[in-house]
Image (cartoon, rainbow, N blue to C red):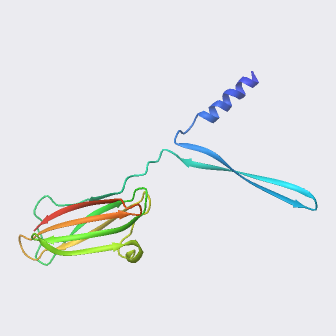
Amino acid sequence: MKKMSLVVLLFVALCGGDENVSKNINEITSTTEFLGVQTTTTLVEPTTIIVDKEIEDLNIEIINCPEDVVDIEVGESFEISFFVQAGYADVTSIFYYFELNGEYYSRLPLDKENHSEFFDFPTVNKKTESGTFVEKFADGDIYLVYIDVIDDDLNSVSTECEVNF
């Protein structure tokens, strides 16, 4: 009966519990010889790996693209808020392109190597929230804002937002 209890207990310990976690054992073996005596040391180190956590795909999403006319005074700015989700690789660049009333207005390319102080480039499976501004110069102004991000694996995603004043 003791053997049966031990087998059941061992089976439950090995198979039961959290299915999201698997355990592997890493062994580091070192052999030393001193004065003709050989000593072998094996360090067994358990490593826990989370298996069930999924890495998201590279993504960009504008959080507050207005559907209606934005009612602010001339000279004031409207913030377009967005988030960037890194996927399997770090985000390395972001590119902003602005049109005002159907014509090219401005662009702003930023890369991780040279512009990290201006944008918090997310690393693998991390999310960054940010924003950009458009200024109202006159009633009836219409901005079209494109935002594109690229990661280390050269994956690219983009989004756009139209802001009507």
Q: Position of residue 123 (x, y in %)?
A: 43, 63
Query: Outermost residue, right direction?
Result: 35
The quadrant in which residue 4 appears is top right
Write the residue at 35% across / 75% down: 118
Quadrant where the image shows the C terminus: bottom left
Closest to the observer, 87 or 8: 87
* 91 up-or-down from 138: above or below: above
Q: Position of residue 48 (x, y in %)?
A: 59, 49
Query: Outermost residue, left direction?
Result: 140
Write the residue at 44% across / 59% down: 124
Q: Position of residue 29 (x, y in %)?
A: 75, 54
Query: Outermost residue, front direction?
Result: 154
Apparent side of residue 150 relative to residue 48 in the rendered image (left or right) = left
* 164 up-or-down from 107: above or below: above
Query: Outermost residue, top direction?
Result: 1
In this rendering, the count of numbered labels is: 0
Write the residue at 70% across / 27% down: 7
Q: Position of residue 37 (x, y in %)?
A: 92, 57
Quadrant where the image shows the N terminus: top right
Closest to the observer, 106 or 131: 106
Apparent side of residue 12 relative to residue 124 in the rendered image (left or right) = right
* 146 up-or-down from 50: above or below: below
The quadrant in which residue 148 appears is bottom left
Apparent side of residue 148 relative to residue 154 in the rendered image (left or right) = left
